Amino acid sequence: MKSYFGYIRVSTQRQGVQGSSLQEQKAAIEGYARRYNLAISEWFEELETAAQQGRPVFSKMLKALQQGHASGVITHKIDRSARNLWDWAYLGDLIDQGVEVHFAHENIDLTSRGGRLSADIQAVVAADYIRNLREEVRKGFYGRLKQGIYPLGAPIGYLNQGGGKPKISDPVRAPLVRAAFELYAAGETSLSQLADYLHECGLRTTTGAKVEVNTLAKILHNPFYIGLIRLRGTGEVFAGIHEPIIPTALFERVQEVCSRRGGHQALRHDFLFRRLVRCELCKLRLIGERQRGHVYYRCHQASCPVTGVREETISGRIGLYFGTFDLSEPEVEEMRELSFGVETQVREANKAKEQALRLNLETVKTRLERLTDAYLDQAIDAELFKAKREDLLFQQRKLEEQQTAGSLPEGHFTRYVEDYLERARALSLSYGTGNPLEKRQILKTVTSNIFASRENVVVELFSPFQEILFAQALSPGADSDEGAQAFRFDGAQGSEMMSPMARCLAGV
């Protein structure tokens, strides 16, 4: 008695539940076999679309038929066996070789010319159906992208909200993703160290697994976190309407760190003042070395007389220097009062800045429109269009971010001054009690340059810390007439001379 294969297929798990399920197809094939007294020796079940070649179960079955393991195959319908013309052509070759092909749902005699023609037509119709379906899916996919909605699964740090809705920030994982960008931008850790640290902090994938190095690298390169959508397959970029997790400036810093590191190698020595201290004589960076239990920072310029400065010496001098930030209560109160008057001027300056940002934003949008027109007119190729579009969308996102940040709430400048006053007053204590990572962060925030030469350490500060320190030097009783003249405040209150602290605030 001849034996036959039974082949059943659904495109997706969902179709297996809601459409012509595997069980229904199998029941129809079994009924057909009983009706025509055909024996089924083996079943081939597949969860795979027929739109493309390479279905593993179907290919395995064709190979078995070619080797003569069965007389033929029984399938539910033509579109269950082939929705691409390659597979149908291969199946046709087997039919020409004498392999029997039966369709339980369709009464077609493939041994006759008319039946073969009918089957060929149905196979072509099935292939066209797939092409049309693919095109409609593509239209819907790009339609969502043009609306600024990402139609695929949410990246780590975001949550899905259903079809047609933008992703929202994950309250648990978004802060950890933001921390990943901040830590890597500091250049203090490798990707493997960062992955381990984030795992300890609780960052997990959607399946609960550890975020591995490769995945973390993709996160750090993904502009989705600044509000842009980039398709990995085509490289196309779209403006998203989801809320960004990180600012564009931070994203840029991370890309710079990634490009400098190349292979993302781990740090061999993580000294406290690594890349923070320069030689006072030749201005080159001092290199940290460990010798006899101590860390020395040496100048490697052959002609430089600076042989090395101990880490304890540099740290002690900086601690003493930060200890000079001793603001009295009258000085603090004076700066607080003056901040109210200065805030009006700051807001006026921000209005001019906002106007400039609006003009720049309009210019970028106009350039985007012209770029699209040039592409549609075939004046530029697709690759150049993608690169230019991504650059302009990035500029647009950056300007929109600056525009949002420029809209300062009432009392912002006063709170800004209060924040820096608190930092200045607690500077010595924070530095003295901080761990190495916290100390490095303080130094990067407060100091613009640190120079060392033997026992001498010179510290230059960022604004407004430098002005605060200078104002203390101009306090009553100090010989500072010439320096005081350099801080004349020409604001709403007039151009009269003010106290050192008031002139310091004007400098802020």
Image: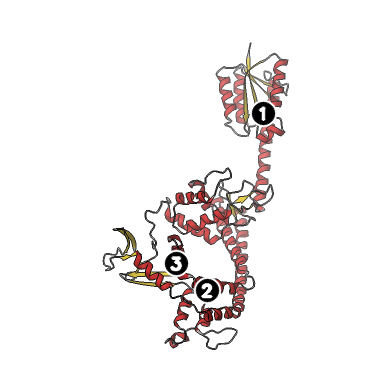
- C-alpha distance separating marks 2 and 1: 74 Å
Residue 391, image x and y in percent? 55, 58
Mark 3 is surrounded, within 10 Å at the Cα level, by few (under 14), some (14 to 19) or many (20 or more) other residues, namely many
Tag 2: amino acid: Leu
Q: Which color scheme does this rendered protein use?
A: secondary structure
Q: Is residue 456 above or below residue 119?
A: below
Q: Could you say which is closer to the camera, residue 329 or residue 303?
A: 329
Q: Is residue 410 above or below residue 495?
A: above
Q: Is residue 335 left or right of residue 141?
A: left
Residue under label 1: 80
Give the mark toward the camera: 2 or 1.
2
- C-alpha distance separating marks 2 and 3: 16 Å
Tag 3: amino acid: Tyr
Q: Could you say which is closer to the camera, residue 478 or residue 406?
A: 478
SS label for mark 2 = helix
Query: Which residue is pictured at 71% across the width and 25% down the height?
Result: 118
Q: How many marks?
A: 3
Residue 284 appears in the figure:
no
Q: Looking at the image, do the residues carrying marks 2 and 1 touch, with CB atoms under 8 Å apart?
A: no
Residue 418, image x and y in percent? 56, 73
Q: Quadrant of residue 113?
A: top right
Tag 1: amino acid: Arg
Residue under label 3: 431
Residue under label 2: 421
Query: Which residue is pictured at 58% across the width and 20% down the height?
Result: 65
Q: Could you say which is closer to the camera, residue 368 or residue 217?
A: 217
SS label for mark 3 = helix
Which of the marked residues, 1 or 3, is nearer the chain's N terminus? Answer: 1
